[in-house]
Amino acid sequence: MSLPLLFAPSLVGRADQPALECDTPSGVRTFTFGDLDTRARRLAGVLSARGLRPGDRLAFCLANRLEVIDLWLACTRLGVIVVPINVLYKGREIGHIIGDAQPTAVVSTPGRAADLPAGTVLWDVEALAAEADRAGGEAGGARATTAAATDAPAAAAPFVATAETPAAIIYTSGTTGVAKGAVLTHGNFAANALALCAAWDITARDRYLAALPLFHVHGLGNGLHCWLVSGCLMKLVERFDREEALGWFEAFRPTLFFGVPTMYTRLLEADPARARAIGQGMRLFVSGSAPLPVAVLEEFRARYGHVILERYGMTETLMNASNPLAGERRPGAVGPALPMTAVEVRDPEGHALPDGQVGELWVRGPNVCAGYWRWPEATQQAFRDGWFRTGDIGVRSADGYLTLQGRRSDLIISGGFNIYPREIEELLCTLPGVREAAVVGEADPVRGEVPVAYVVGDADPAALEAQVRAALASFKVPRRWVRLDALPRTALGKVQKHLLAARA
Ligand code: MLC
Ligand code: AMP
């Protein structure tokens, strides 16, 4: 099924019902599903008029805002493939994505022009929205009805997506360090949203507080899509802000919240009376994207009166496993595989292991991406006989619960954002005064892990930090710098990262 058809019961069937509360230049506004459908149709008309055709890519580099939703809905309607870019990324990170996905344009704010490679077309998000508004005005008044909006140009070029039509290319460093574009289809997103709405009983009665970035699958594939499929009311905020978060809970009174562990750690800063009052109105808190420390789960239970439901996913596979809504939410475990997804624990040769034995998790199901964008070798390496090799190491209990124990690669997850050490190491080695560098993750009470750099050479750490900060997203900047005479290496010359801390 295509996403527009999956969303139609909400966008068309609940046209008059409140759908979205969010900030706009004229203050906080509420939009109905019909309003959003109209906006998407108008924008689709503008995008078609600008020449976008099915299969073309359109990137966006934006913090959460109404226009990201418009863009997503318009592109899924047109068969245009969306390429979300982390808004914290800088020039070289963005450059790789643009070079690889080759989007027709990047929708962003004009201030980001300097971060785009030469020759990239930037479409100003506000100019695009204004053009769509004007097109709507011409097509039937400032607040066109759904019927009037069908006269907009988009209606002239209907596109029918299938389950296999790519909807997005989302870049992730995976296990190799070079960001690869996971091609996620309409069918992948549909299967994921249907599985989650069923598993977590998300209905139109829910109120979802959306604080996760929409450029990652957690906010997009889980948050945005469960909202659109269930037809509930969503409050969208620009980003999670620990100073403001409690106020949002109190004012909006959500029943549903999805977050990364860092957000739950921040929410523990609430005083007990406030936390208890917020907990009373809530139905479900879900955590994922990084391990939820058992201590945070326990403290949260004591403070908010809720056991956070932990689930496990990946950009390439969307969601794979979840603790049950009704049933035991086992601390430290990510629960059984979701109903449409098979998860097996395999040995390095690819043989399935019995329960209780540790191995790599392999996944198969309608949620698993079509492969990596224009990269058959990487796709071939990641898949075998229809199974996707996650690179995550884990174990399954006799009653089917999965527990993650680590990763095959040295990926660092900080606040739910992925950091691949090699990217930072390669940058460091180009800087003056650095002969060798190794970056590893160090436990952090709030972000889960933070990067630490071990450097050989006479470079000044402050100067290195400034240069890394100028080149890479802020969450990749090493939080600590250690100078060494030499990196510990094996006889074959491979850096022994596990010995770095001791060597220091
Ligand atoms: C973080 N920062 C942001 C930002 N998030 N800046 C702009 N927009 C955002 N959305 C920057 C800050 O400027 C700051 O930079 C640093 O990150 C930490 O910010 P903070 O204010 O101290 O926030 P903190 O309380 O630590 O919380 C950070 C966070 C953020 C939790 C809000 O890490 C976050 O949004 N994480 C979500 C990541 C996510 O969605 N992952 C899903 C991937 S999909 P500086 O310079 O001070 O360091 C996936 C699959 C799956 O993994 O299973 O879901
Ligand atoms: P990404 O590439 O950003 O999609 O990150 C996916 C990775 O996040 C997975 O391969 C896991 O290593 C990790 N992850 C996701 N959910 C969890 C979880 N609940 N517990 C531990 N790790 C998780």
Image: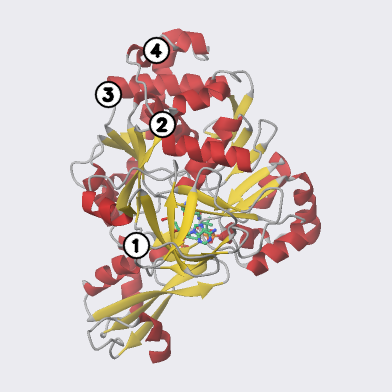
Apparent side of residue 365 relative to residue 267 in the rendered image (left or right): left
Crowding at mark 4 (Cα within 10 Å: few <14, some 14-19, many 20+): many
Sequence-first tag of 3 and 2:
3
Q: Which residue is mark 3?
A: 50
Q: Which residue is mark 4?
A: 152
Q: Which residue is mark 1?
A: 175
Q: Nearer the viewer, residue 411 or 303?
A: 411
Q: Residue placed at 47% from the left, 33% from the top?
A: 69
Occupied quadrant, residue 467: bottom left
Q: Nearer the viewer, residue 426 or 348?
A: 348
Q: Which residue is mark 2?
A: 71
In the rendered structure, which amino acid carries the disc numbered 1?
Answer: Thr
Percent coordinates x, y for residue 440 in the rendering: 39, 75
Task: Report the Cα–Cα distance between label 4 and label 3.
Answer: 14 Å
Local SS, label 4 = loop
Q: Residue placed at 39% from the left, 65% from the top?
A: 476
- 54 is higher (above) or lower (below) than 325: above
Task: Report the Cα–Cα distance between label 1 and label 2.
Answer: 30 Å
Occupied quadrant, residue 483: bottom left
